[in-house]
Amino acid sequence: MYVPSLQTAVDRYGTSLTIPKMLEKLHPRAKGNPGNAGALAPAIVLTSVSAFEGFVEEFVALVAAHRNQSFGQIAKLATMNNPTVKTFDEKLRNVLQWGDGATWKTLFSIETWKAPAVGDSTWIQKQSRTWAEAEEDADGWMQVRHCLTHGLVRGFRPEVWPGPLRGTIAASSVLRPQSSGRHSLSLHGAESCAHVYRSCGQKLADEAAQFLGHPPLSWDKVPDFPL
């Protein structure tokens, strides 16, 4: 049976990420109220998380196929609800039985935007995140996505965001705190969301390809959201 290469899933991920990348470029990045451009940040979160979900489903299915798993096993593995970075990690461990990746996870780091505290300067700083922290951030962004998808918030102005719909990590954990218990989703936050999912997805996929003895994956055509 012919099984497409793992690169196929990566290439399609690149196609899916084209839309949030184009949306990012549309933002004026001017100080003050962005007006209608305020809708770009929630749109980037929605489209980048959706692209990651599709990538995980296809990549896991291909890995399972290359491990000679049955159609039933592949269907079960690829059936998942709102996969996060943790989900991707767990699925690959299930298929590959390759341990917990403690060595490379210890060396992993990623930069994200650090939202200022209430009353602090509006100057956005960068922060370095470990693998465990990046996984938690991805969970937080999934909660942001849930709130937006289910119409619990609009996402383009400071609002009170609901608690976790699943798990213990709230959407507010990755958003900018405002007064009166509100939080806001900015373009910087949306960029961090897309960057975390894309970077962690690449690391897991690269490790899987290496473990299987496949050629290195090319990410040249997969948009990223560097800070």
Image: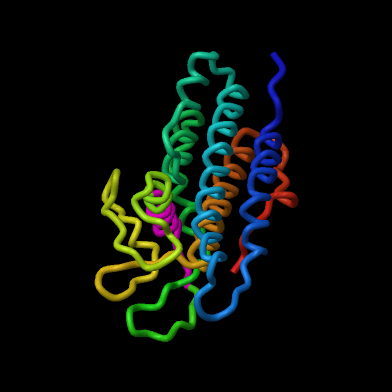
Residue 3 lies, in percent from the top left, at 69, 22
Residue 60's place in the image compared with 147, above or below, is above
Residue 173 lies, in percent from the top left, at 34, 62
Residue 128 is a magenta residue: yes
Range drawn in magenta: 127-142
Residue 195 lies, in percent from the top left, at 56, 58
Residue 145 lies, in percent from the top left, at 43, 49
Find residue 84 and report its image quarter: top left
Q: Is residue 196 left or right of residue 171?
A: right
Residue 209's place in the image compared with 171, above or below, is above
Q: In the orientation shown, which residue stands out farthest toward the front?
A: 36
- Could you tell me if residue 73 is visible in this image? yes
Residue 134 is a magenta residue: yes
Q: Is residue 133 left or right of residue 58?
A: left
- Could you tell me if residue 111 is visible in this image? no
Q: Closer to the camera, 70 or 47? A: 47
Q: Residue at x 59, y 78 (%)?
A: 30
Q: Residue at x 46, y 35 (%)?
A: 93
Residue 172's place in the image compared with 203, above or below, is below
Q: Is residue 98 left or right of residue 68?
A: left
Q: How many marks?
A: 0
Q: Residue at x 40, y 78 (%)?
A: 116
Q: Residue at x 65, y 36 (%)?
A: 9
Quadrant in the picture for the C terminus: bottom right
Find residue 24 and report its image quarter: bottom right
Q: Closer to the camera, 140 or 91? A: 140
Q: Magenta stretch: dominant SS?
A: helix
Find residue 137 and report its image quarter: bottom left
Quadrant in the picture for the N terminus: top right
